[in-house]
Image (spheres, rainbow, N blue to C red):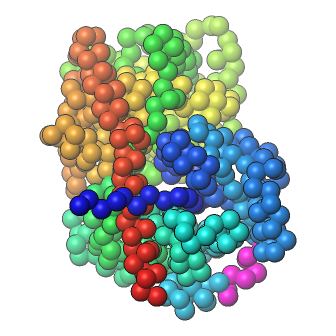
């Protein structure tokens, strides 16, 4: 007889990125929300930090009538100050934003109790640890208050938290409301990211690293401690890829109970004629920007490539991308001019006035502007990793070079002063994208790229790259829509050559072949929609609810 699948009646989920767009976790939660809201209509609640105060947050639609009775109770009885409304994303799920500042004065007592209950070491905390932990604690109090006010022991309730920043709240619920099943998801181990970011070889020596010892060495003890203790004490511990699961086994001494791969929704991808029009507009904008900045006349036959994401120079593979472009300048097989963009937010100062003036002019220019490889001035022009590497390699965008590189160091939100077009409207103007990550638990940027029918180059050190290999049944090749480059701790130069050769080869393809590759890319992206990946969340809910019921029976 088949056992009946346990499905929650209510789901709570907390993250620092609820109604607060910071990074990839925002994409995970905001794209998945529609799928879950359709199934658990207004029985899924996202809890985020009220970092906007009373100011208008474009991602949050406040509704003062929604859950008003509980909100009044929470304020009067438990001194919880919350704003309730809808997350302004597809599906518009209920969002609860909590003010956590009041808990700072209690933090020593909160940390002491966490040590007594779960051996969480907060003694070595610094930076954003206090802010994240006070939010996490407040989020736990919200779940406790809501559960006691509205729900009963017959309701199956799950509380899922994301990253070390929300661990304290998960442990609070584990102790204070044991009836609620807890799930903790690490999207990247704090210590693994730190090892990689500190230029230590992560993969070849992973079996030999001791997470606690490395945390002491890299001054990461408190973040590592809350992450590790949460992983060990929740009802279900999850991560986002097999490659990160290996990290968890070695660095947290706890393998994931369920791997929750990151899907997405494709409702932001234009269709049909709209796609053609938007692609043409994006290409015209990028070519015009290059021509005005560089004083050249690149035409539509130019091969436009790009990389984007967080400014993690080594982890995101920005360094090896620049190296490959430098080598491409000497490639005899390159058949087209290449315009390469690096769109990662740096320490931005202001939009270049000289560039704005040229962009507003209808003239053509045959002389470059000063510093003809950046669109915005930085506060740290003399100490920026992208600019430093370009200078070191003498990549100056000279007129006789077939490869031109432009650094766009800002968030592409449509209001940067130069590009003035949102990222999703720009990305589909690329012919090819490159994301050769060294440390990448999943990898949304290459997935988004292929959703826009733009073939991509990624690596097998990214969860997404490994997933592609598993789907196509071999190491992904350009003809599959995704080229998956093999990366190790020590093959940087080989990776640069493979990327260089792939771009060069792509420049020789006829339009019919490129169209076939773009079609393959789009078909691959379709396999990563949430409707295919949401089943892993049901596995996690089941796992957590069964563990919680066993735990309660024992007590």
Q: Quadrant of residue 320?
A: top left
Instruction: Residue 513: give x, y in percent of width and height.
Output: 23, 15
Instruction: Residue 162: give x, y in percent of width and height.
Output: 50, 61
Instruction: Residue 90: give x, y in percent of width and height.
Output: 58, 37
Where 100 sits versus 378, above or below? below
Residue 70 falls inside the magenta stretch: no
Residue 174 relative to residue 522: left or right: right
Q: Residue furthest left?
A: 474
In the rendered structure, which segment of residues is drawn in magenta? 102-109
Residue 107 falls inside the magenta stretch: yes
Q: Residue furthest top?
A: 363
What secondary structure characterizes most of the magenta part?
helix
Residue under the image location 20 percent in, 33 percent down: 477
Residue 298 relative to residue 180: left or right: left
| Front residue of this view, candidates 19 and 126 | 19
Residue under the image location 29 percent in, 73 percent down: 250
| Front residue of this view, candidates 88 and 375 | 88
């Amino acid at each position: 007889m088949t056992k009946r699948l346990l499905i929650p009646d209510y789901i709570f989920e907390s993250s620092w990125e609820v109604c607060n767009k910071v990074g990839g976790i925002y994409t995970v939660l905001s794209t998945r929300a529609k799928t879950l809201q359709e199934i658990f209509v207004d029985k899924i609640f996202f809890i985020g930090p009220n970092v906007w105060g009373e100011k208008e947050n474009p991602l949050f639609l406040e509704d003062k009538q929604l859950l008003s009775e509980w909100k009044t109770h929470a304020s009067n009885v438990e001194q919880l100050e919350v704003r309730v409304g809808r997350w302004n994303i597809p599906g518009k799920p209920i969002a609860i934003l909590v003010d956590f500042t009041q808990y700072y004065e209690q933090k020593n007592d909160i940390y002491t109790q966490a040590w007594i209950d779960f051996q969480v070491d907060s003694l070595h905390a610094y930076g954003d640890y206090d802010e994240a932990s006070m939010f996490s604690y407040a989020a736990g109090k919200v779940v406790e208050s809501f559960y006691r006010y509205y729900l009963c022991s017959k309701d199956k309730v799950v509380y899922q938290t994301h990253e070390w920043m929300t661990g304290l709240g998960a442990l609070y619920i584990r102790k204070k409301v044991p009836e609620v099943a807890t799930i903790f998801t690490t999207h990247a181990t704090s210590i693994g990211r730190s090892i990689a970011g500190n230029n230590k070889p992560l993969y070849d020596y992973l079996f030999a690293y001791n997470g606690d010892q490395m945390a002491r060495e890299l001054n990461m003890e408190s973040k590592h401690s809350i992450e590790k203790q949460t992983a060990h004490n929740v009802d279900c511990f999850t991560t986002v890829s097999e490659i990160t699961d290996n990290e968890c086994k070695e660095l947290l001494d706890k393998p994931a109970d369920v791997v929750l791969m990151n899907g997405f929704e494709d409702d932001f991808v234009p269709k049909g004629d709209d796609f053609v029009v938007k692609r043409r507009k994006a290409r015209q904008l990028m070519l015009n920007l290059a021509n005005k900045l560089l004083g050249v006349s690149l035409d539509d036959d130019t091969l436009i490539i790009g990389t984007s994401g967080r400014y993690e120079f080594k982890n995101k593979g920005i360094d090896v991308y620049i190296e490959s472009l430098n080598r491409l300048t000497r490639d005899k097989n390159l058949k087209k001019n290449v315009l390469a963009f690096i769109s990662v937010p740096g320490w931005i100062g202001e939009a270049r006035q000289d560039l704005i003036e040229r962009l507003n002019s209808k003239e053509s220019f045959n002389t470059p502007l000063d510093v003809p490889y950046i669109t915005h001035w930085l506060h740290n022009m003399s100490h920026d990793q992208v600019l430093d590497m370009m200078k070191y390699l003498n990549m100056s965008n000279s007129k006789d070079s077939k490869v031109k590189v432009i650094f766009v160091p800002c968030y592409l939100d449509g209001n940067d002063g130069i590009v003035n077009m949102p990222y999703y409207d720009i990305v589909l103007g690329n012919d090819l994208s490159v994301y050769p990550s060294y440390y990448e638990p999943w990898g949304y940027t290459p997935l988004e790229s292929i959703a826009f029918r733009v073939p991509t180059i990624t690596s097998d050190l990214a969860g997404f790259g490994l997933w592609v290999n598993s789907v196509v049944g071999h190491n992904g090749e350009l003809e599959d829509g995704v080229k998956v480059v093999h990366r190790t701790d020590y093959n940087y130069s080989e990776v640069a050559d493979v990327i260089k050769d792939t771009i060069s080869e792509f420049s020789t393809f006829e339009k019919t072949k490129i169209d076939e590759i773009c079609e393959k890319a789009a078909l691959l992206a379709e396999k990563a929609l949430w409707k295919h990946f949401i089943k892993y969340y049901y596995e996690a809910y089941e796992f957590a609810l069964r563990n919680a019921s066993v735990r309660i029976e024992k007590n």
